[in-house]
């Protein structure tokens, strides 16, 4: 499922690289060129990447069905699994729609983070595991949501910061790639809401320009810092992570599992790539 999301995400964002290597649509575009095939190399790459993303989610289903898990357990988990896939696609669509709207709403951007990342990355997988377990109690689902939703959103907010300030040597992507793409994140919404007239004019001059050079990236980074938007998003990440860790320590989760969830909360929000 995650591979499906990454392939489609790179396609929708027109991201040419992933972890230092060409994105799937670029790899297929290169295959078309190298083999001197007929038609548009770019269109071939786009079409093939859609099919590869679809194949990945089909393989996810196949792996579940062939996992050896008892049929009764799979049946109990299918409602969660189905909802997880629906929410993932809804989140991807919301991401595209917010870009088209040129949204400046922090609330709307947080909703995208919740559906695009929070639910399918953390909350639903925990629900999925609980559904597979014969020993899971109904109240655990609520605790997993209290943990998974804020942590998933914090994970996405960290991703948004990395997309602007990340080191290419660690991210495998060009510096400021999200700024070239004009991604409408919480970080950008916060920047625009806090900017004065001159800052906004300067920001809009560079933001979303495909040919944005390093000097332009630095201008945008400076505005994000000067407005206090970066500090605000860092504070949000800290608050959300704290909420998740509090849930992990609740009585509804075993101490051993709670300790592991706390470790995951730190790893998910302190990363650099």
Image (cartoon, rainbow, N blue to C red):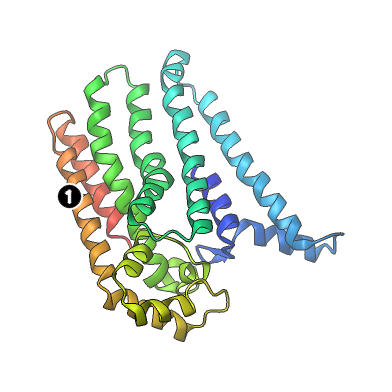
Instruction: Give the image quarter of residue 137.
Output: top left
What residue would you read off at disc 1?
Answer: 242
Residue at left offset 32%, top offset 60%? 271
- Element under label 1? helix
Pick out the residue farthest to the right.
Answer: 38
User: In the rendered view, would you say 243 is above or below 238?
Assistant: above
**In the picture provided, is 42 more to the left or to the right than 238?**
right
Q: Answer whether residue 166 is visible to the viewer in this image.
A: no
Q: Position of residue 245 (x, y in %)?
A: 18, 45
Residue at left offset 22%, top offset 35%? 257
Front in this rendered view, residue 87 or 127: 87
Pick out the residue farthest to the front.
Answer: 197
Q: Position of residue 249 (x, y in %)?
A: 14, 38
Front in this rendered view, residue 256 or 148: 148
User: In the rendered view, would you say 102 is above or below 246?
Assistant: below
Residue at left offset 22%, top offset 51%? 241
Q: Position of residue 72 (x, y in %)?
A: 44, 13
Instruction: Give the image quarter of residue 37.
Output: bottom right
């Amino acid at each position: 499922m995650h591979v499906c999301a990454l392939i489609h995400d790179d396609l929708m964002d027109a991201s040419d690289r992933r972890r230092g290597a060409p994105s799937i649509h670029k790899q297929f575009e290169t295959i078309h060129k190298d083999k001197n095939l007929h038609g548009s190399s770019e269109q071939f790459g786009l079409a093939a990447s859609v099919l590869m993303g679809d194949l990945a989610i089909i393989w996810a289903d196949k792996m579940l069905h062939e996992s050896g898990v008892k049929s009764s357990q799979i049946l109990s988990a299918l409602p969660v699994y189905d909802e997880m896939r629906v929410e993932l696609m809804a989140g991807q669509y919301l991401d595209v729609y917010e870009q088209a709207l040129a949204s400046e709403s922090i609330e709307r951007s947080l909703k995208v983070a919740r559906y695009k990342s929070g639910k399918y990355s953390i909350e639903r997988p925990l629900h999925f595991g609980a559904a597979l377990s014969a020993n899971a109690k109904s109240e655990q689902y609520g605790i997993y949501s209290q943990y998974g939703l804020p942590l998933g959103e914090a994970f996405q907010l960290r991703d948004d910061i990395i997309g602007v300030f990340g080191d290419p040597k660690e991210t495998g992507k060009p510096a400021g790639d999200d700024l070239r793409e004009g991604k409408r994140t919480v970080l950008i919404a916060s920047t625009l809401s806090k900017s004065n007239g001159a800052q906004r004019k300067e920001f809009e001059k560079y933001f979303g320009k495909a040919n944005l050079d390093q000097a332009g990236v630095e201008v945008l980074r400076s505005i994000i810092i000067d407005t206090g938007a970066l500090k605000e998003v860092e504070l949000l990440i800290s608050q959300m992570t704290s909420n998740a860790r509090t849930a992990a320590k609740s009585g509804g989760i075993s101490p051993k599992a709670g300790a592991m969830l706390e470790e995951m909360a730190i790893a998910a929000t302190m990363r650099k790539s």
